[in-house]
Amino acid sequence: MTTDITINLQPHHLTLAEAMRTIIAFDGEGRPIVAFRNGTNYVRGLSGDVLLKRTIAPGQKERRKLSADERQAILAEILHDAHRMIEQIAATAPPEAHDWFKRIRRWDVASLEEERARFRTIYKPISIVPPDQYRALVLQATEGCSWNRCHFCTFYRDRPFRIHTPTTFREHIRQVKAFVGAGLGLRMAIFLGDANALITPQPRLRSLLQVIHEEFPIGPTAPLKGIYSFLDIFGAERKTLTDYRELADAGVRRIYLGLESGDDTVFHQLNKPGSPAEAIEVVQTIKAAGIAVGVILLAGAGGSRFAADHVQHSIDVIAAMNLGPDDIVYLSPLIVTPDSPYLDQLRESGSQPLDTAEITKQVQTLKQSLRTVVAPGTKVVLYHIEEFVY
């Protein structure tokens, strides 16, 4: 009997494909992690959420998390396809694949949903991670956001800010390790959450980083290459060059800052603490310590009235940061909810939100211009927050 089913067996994942029309990948625990079916991509995170991504028209993509009913229905279809493909190739598959098949077969929709509930006993919601860290292992040294008053952001409104003690952080890490299991092999780094975990006072932060090193091998030759984290500008100015050098010695490789806009008016309209000028100083200090940066700009911030100033002043600020090949500039289309206080403030200032086409055009303008003011090799890339699921 001939079959058009192929298997790709890697150290930390297995992929089944049928005539390249249906493709399903599994982690070391046998959990489905990515599937392509009927022209649609599905990504299942450790959280159990499933993200749908597909092109609906030239230049138009749909990105959304599935509802509970949709999630359970598509998982049933994915598992059915996987089990059927395994049955067809089991007799001719290499011996090392059969342990994978056992792990895959033990999952059904009910057990995947039970695991989803278990995730929520270990983690607070993981709202956002930079795109280059989507394959990192998130460890929540802090929970929530110490500022939590940016007008455009509602990610952390549901929880108070909390910094773990070394003891509770170690307990969290061990729960994470037990939950992820053999899926850890797919993780390339540690991402230290939540929103601005590095605002943690240096003595406590030093202790938390030490716990990480006691629990994981980290370094250039280790599976986990380094530690990455967010830091807001108002927190960044509290650390010294010596502090950042200590973080570099502890394996911190890149720090991400939400500049959002280089224009003072737009920056404060967003209710960001600090200022664009302080952001320049902070980035220069971080880089002097040997740590790379990721700087995030919001395309569409300021709306129609401030669009030109937002673009030009953001370019000027990025130029002053002297970014290099290890650094990244992320351009994130601004997405706000209808009840956002940012929209009220925008309209009070006589401005209107940009539509999708205008934001897309602004992204292209920023991308082209920024590439002329950063060093060769510096990445200037799109960051679409709706494409993330952990």
Image (cartoon, rainbow, N blue to C red):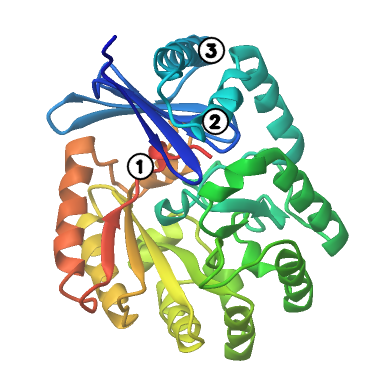
| Residue at the image point whose x is 71% and y is 47% from the top | 177
Image disc number at residue 72: 3
Give the distance between the C-alpha atoms of the residues marked 2 and 1, in whole angstroms: 56 Å
The residue carrying mark 2 is 100
> Which secondary structure lies at badge 1?
helix
| Residue at the image point whose x is 87% and y is 59% from the top | 167
Task: Name the side, left or right, on which 372 lies relative to 233.
Answer: left
Q: Nearer the viewer, mark 2 or mark 1?
A: 2
Q: Does the image show residue 149?
A: no
Q: Nearer the viewer, residue 276 or 43?
A: 43
- Is 210 drawn above or below residue 147 in the view shown? below
How far across and how far down the image is residue 50, in percent? 48, 26
The residue carrying mark 1 is 347
Q: Nearer the viewer, mark 3 or mark 2?
A: 2
Task: Name the side, left or right, on which 14 lies relative to 31.
Answer: left
Task: Name the side, left or right, on which 165 lies relative to 135.
Answer: right
Question: In terms of sequence position, does the residue under pointer 3 or pointer 2 come before the other?
Answer: 3
- Is 384 drawn above or below residue 254 in the view shown? above
Residue at the right extreme of this rendering = 167
> Which secondary structure lies at badge 3?
helix
Give the distance between the C-alpha atoms of the residues marked 1 and 3, in whole angstroms: 41 Å
User: In the picture, which quadrant includes the N terminus?
Assistant: top left
| Residue at the image point whose x is 50% and y is 69% from the top | 255
Crowd band around label 1 with a 10 angstrom C-alpha radius: few (<14), some (14–19), many (20+)? some
How far across and how far down the image is residue 344, in percent? 43, 40
Q: Amino acid at mark 3?
A: Gln
Give the quarter of the image for residue 168. bottom right
Q: Amino acid at mark 1?
A: Arg
Q: Amino acid at mark 2?
A: Trp
